[in-house]
Image (spheres, coloured by chain):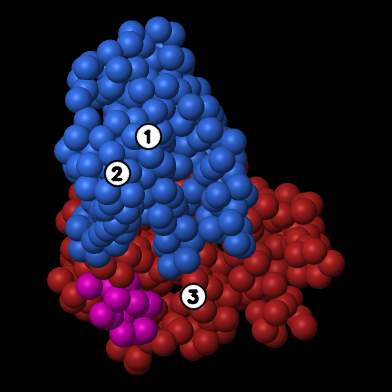
Chain colours: A blue, B red
Amino acid sequence: MSRPASTWVREAAAVFAKEWRSELRTRYALNTLALFAINTLVVVSASLGPLGAAPGKGSEALPVLLWLILLFAAAAGLPRSFVHEEETQTATALRLAATPSALFCGKLAYALTLLAALEALVAPLFLAVMNLDVARPGLLVATLAAGGFGLAAGSTLVAAIIAQARGKGTLFAVLSFPVLLPLLLLAVELTRGAFAGAPPGVALVQLLLYDGAVTTAGLMLFPVVWNP
Amino acid sequence: MLPALRFAQVRRRFGRLAVLGGVSASVAAGEVLLVTGRNGSGKSTLLRCLAGLLAPDSGTIDYSEDGAPLDAAGRRRRIGLVAPDLAFYGELTAAENLAFFSRLRGIGRERGDELLRRLELPPDRPTAALSSGMRQRLRWAWALLHRPRLLLLDEPFQNLDAAGVAITRGLLAEHLAPSPIASDRPDRQDHPDRQDCQDRPAGPDLREGLAAGAAGPDRAVAGAAPGLAVVANPVPLEIGSVAASLDLGA
């Protein structure tokens, strides 16, 4: 059943607003993501950073660590979006009232803003505690934006798939690995380039194509996954 | 053209367990189809199939509004459902929950406020802090929010006190016969071949609901045409209001 674009946008906006209203009441995802990210950051900085190791040591690995922190923090908080709907039985009301693609986009927008907030917290802290100089700050910002979008889109899609299954935690790890691996490889390469001052090459285009592909796949798959 | 629901040979299995083994019935505008049966007989499963929440393994479900047939996706959007497993966001208030779903459905907030008032629900209390009876009233409010023509009611009076039962019965009566001058069963001629239902005239309890205020100026189910309902485990709905019944047995 086709619906006007204005109706679709209104539904997606309603879902987005509801997600944030609920989040600001419970602060579950905000607290989980922030605490997980900061704890990991402290461990990493104490082990490898200026506080615990010689400067420059492991600089090749630092972009990997930045994206691992973001990945695991996202994995700790983002799947709850759909899982919570199933566990608290609010999914039935949503199925009967929301257009699936609008619901997916509302949830994706929520995950994206949540992840953007996480990146805004973690990235400056990471650069500070690791005493890193960024040769191409613009590229780093673009990588975080595109990588964050892909991470949010991939996590939202996988979260929707696992929401109705048993063993959700294991399934999320199993399914998100192949979905998010290309994203992480590209994001790490681009972040390394931003630190070293190397041009982005085709990696940034590939990352943007990945974002488009995952979002399109989500919009196409979600109605099938969501409804019987 | 008035809405009508007809389903035939609906079968549904869960693994090896056959829950619905070829169920057929039909219901027309202004009528109630009463679904009875013991626990585990498939009443809730049938209602979920009718709602489009569960795909039957085989069989047909035909539902049309204004002459246009609706598929499962269409039914999901149009029907009103009251069911024990229907829940709302505990961290949001009753008014916020209804406002969210109103926004999803493109309805103004006034409709939700009106239903909260009719169902005597506290608008500013978080849903998690509502009693089980209050939550059941909220399910009714949610189900009627978009003025559905087809109501699917699974244990609709569960946890309700006497006042709650009276209010919701009034709302159901109003749904079935929105105007006092409307005929009880205005589209009987559209369904001359109903062989699987036991037809009964609309009973006095519906008229009592109307007389109790359902048809007054504060009506919450304002619609020009009568709706229809499928009710599972309807205690304490009087059998006199039932136009057709379907016993799923054991």
Q: Nearer the viewer, residue B89 or A40?
A: A40
**Which residue is the site of mark 3?**
B84
First reached walking from the N terminus: tag 2 or tag 1: 2
| Distance Cα–Cα, label 3 vs label 1 | 57 Å
| Tags 2 and 1 touching, CB below 8 Å | yes
Judged from the image, the secondary structure of the residue bearing numbered disc 1 is loop
The residue located at (34%, 92%) in the rendering is: B162
| Nearer mark to the viewer, of 3 and 1 | 1
Other residues around mark 1 within 10 Å, as few (<14) / some (14–19) / many (≥20): few
The chain under label 3 reads B
**Which residue is the site of mark 1?**
A58
Location of residue B100 in the rendering, given as x and y in whole percent from the top left corner: 27, 53
| Tags 3 and 1 touching, CB below 8 Å | no
The chain under label 2 reads A
The residue located at (69%, 85%) in the rendering is: B38
Residue A123 vertical position relative to residue A193 in the rendered view, above or below: below
Indicate the quadrant where residue B174 lies: bottom left
Residue B163 showing in the rendered view: yes
Indicate the quadrant where residue B122 lies: bottom left
Residue A147 showing in the rendered view: no
Dominant secondary structure of the magenta stretch?
Answer: helix
**Which residue is the site of mark 2?**
A53
Q: Which residues are magenta?
A: B126-138
